[in-house]
Amino acid sequence: MPAAARDPVALPALLPLGLDGVLVRFGTTFTEEANRAARAFAAEAAALDGVTEVVPAPASVLLRLDPLDQPADQVQGAARALLDSRDWLSLPPAPAARCWHLPVSFATAHAPDLPEVARITGLPEAEVVTRILAERPRVLAIGFAPGQPYLGQLPPVFDLPRRAQLQDVPAGALTLAIRQMVLFSNASPTGWMQIGRAAFRPFQPDATDPMPLCTGDEIRFHAVSDSELEALGADPMGGARLEVLS
Amino acid sequence: MTGAALIVSAPGPALTVQDLGRPGHAGQGLSRGGALDPLALWEAAALLGLKGPVASVEMPGMGAAFEVTAPMRLALTGAPMQATLDGQPLVWHAAHPVQPGQILRIGGTTGGTVGYLTPAGGIATPPLMGSRAAHLAAGIGTLLSDGTSLPTGDDPTPHRPACTLRPEPRFGGGSLRLLHGPQTHLFDHARMQSFLAARFTRGPRSNRQAIQLLCDAAQDWHLDAGGMASEPIQAGDVQITGDGTPFVLGPECQTIGGYPRIGSIHPEDLPRLIQADARSPLQFTLLDDAGAVPLPVPPAARLKRLAASVTPLLRDPAQMQDLLSYQLISGVTAGDDLDRP
């Protein structure tokens, strides 16, 4: 049985990590409810006394503290009080405050795994693209690489396994697996399947705001041609447009 | 003296500029990064009389040839490396005045894994997000290449005589204290006891992202963690990969990950892990979950303690042709052995 399935710790759980961290775990596996809880808790935990950094993950949140400045048990106590203040796992879905419109090319050169996704899902390639364009995925978490978003959750038809054999994808690769998408910040080997490419770069080291995406942001993809993508490539924003929703 | 520079020639394969990294961006996917052995940067600060660490050249395994364009002191800390100035052996764990025209050659490590060269004014490349550290995994900075000219800050006392210090002992492996973490409880008693009994050495798949630990024993502590959501991870965490091989996360680790972690190494013990070479045995001891966890050493106290061990380098190394035969560091201690758990 997988370890996650027999984890005896009651949820949500508050667990120390190293000398300078407190992990607040809402789920051992990904669920929309745990992700909502993690994002909502992260937003409020940043204001807790003694918390120096907040790291939201798909179903948990890490609070960092300085043990030389404030004892870890005090920060844990504050986190526990916030945790006990409401039923985080029963929060209703919150509307996104912002929506990013991102141009993406699904041309063959940028979608090497589209045929494989079509084969596994049983959908024609054009239908895969149509369905992705109709989705309004949210940024579930940012991590692995700087600014790099995990997007989702997609419908069950896109519950594809990650490949065991890693393949290289370029920066800007839009990849798909396990009902989620990742938009790669940097060229990287991955088991996720590349179905498109954006000129937008989630990590822009020379920009004032190097990591423009935030957890909770909504994303809409807009199909562009190969040559249109190339024309957008000079700017790391890659034609991205930010719409403020509320 | 603005405009001074440190010129790098024929560098080893993995030289980068490093400082204490960029804390505060893990929520946006950027791990802290920074020096593999931050203690070496504190030692350099003590030798150079600085208020704290400055940007240095990190040299895993192999160094380079260096020249300066203005007189300045250079500190050599971390893993001892073969070093000569104009052909004369130089003492490691020391700061030396260097003049333009002289050639400092730094070869391979003679113990440990990674050494540091720190100019007294620090490397003065433009900071990015508050740090000068290369974070190659994130696409920040580059490896130092042949002919690189690194700007350096001002050394107010470039001719101050050479001095040395007692390094904190950490170059031969030893015991690593393991803190309980969010997934430690997934490892049952038998798995944990087996893990704690094992002797490890550094594996070849070690880099700034993670240190691979190898052992001869059956790695029967591994877990099937399939389906577990990725959680925040950080340097010092001990990940157990699918076949049981532990990887200790390094400064350039990713920010979230899905492998189960048996615990985290106490931050004060991380330099000992980093500096353990492939011949140095390592073993874990589990800190009591219920007991008081020893805190890290406060920065000011660390600098004070290191500064107190700095002494003038009394003999001119240029006159010591047989320098390498001296037992320069064997048997020294940090002086706090009785205070350690």
Image: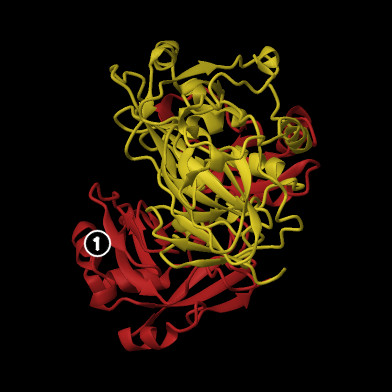
Chain colours: A red, B yellow
Residue sitting nearer the eye, A138 or A197: A197
Query: Which chain contains the residue that carries disc 1?
Result: A
Residue sitting nearer the eye, B145 or A13: B145
Task: Reply above or below: A74 against B230.
Answer: above
Using the rendered view, name the quadrant where residue A121 is placed. Answer: bottom left
Number of marks in picture? 1
Quarter in which the C terminus of chain B is drawn: top right
Task: Reply above or below: A75 against A143.
Answer: above
**x and y, in percent, of residue B196 in the image:** 44, 15
Q: Residue furthest front?
A: B319
The amino acid type of the residue labelled 1 equals: Val
Residue A145 in sight here: no
Name the residue located 50 percent from the left edge and 77 percent from the top edge. Answer: A236
> Horizontally, is B18 left or right of B336 in the view?
left
Q: Secondary structure at mark 1?
A: helix
* Residue hosting label 1: A117
Using the rendered view, name the quadrant where residue B220 is placed. Answer: top left
Name the residue located 52 percent from the left edge and 47 percent from the top edge. Answer: B255
**x and y, in percent, of residue B153 in the image:** 68, 63
**x and y, in percent, of residue B172 in the image:** 46, 24
**x and y, in percent, of residue A229 in the image:** 38, 83
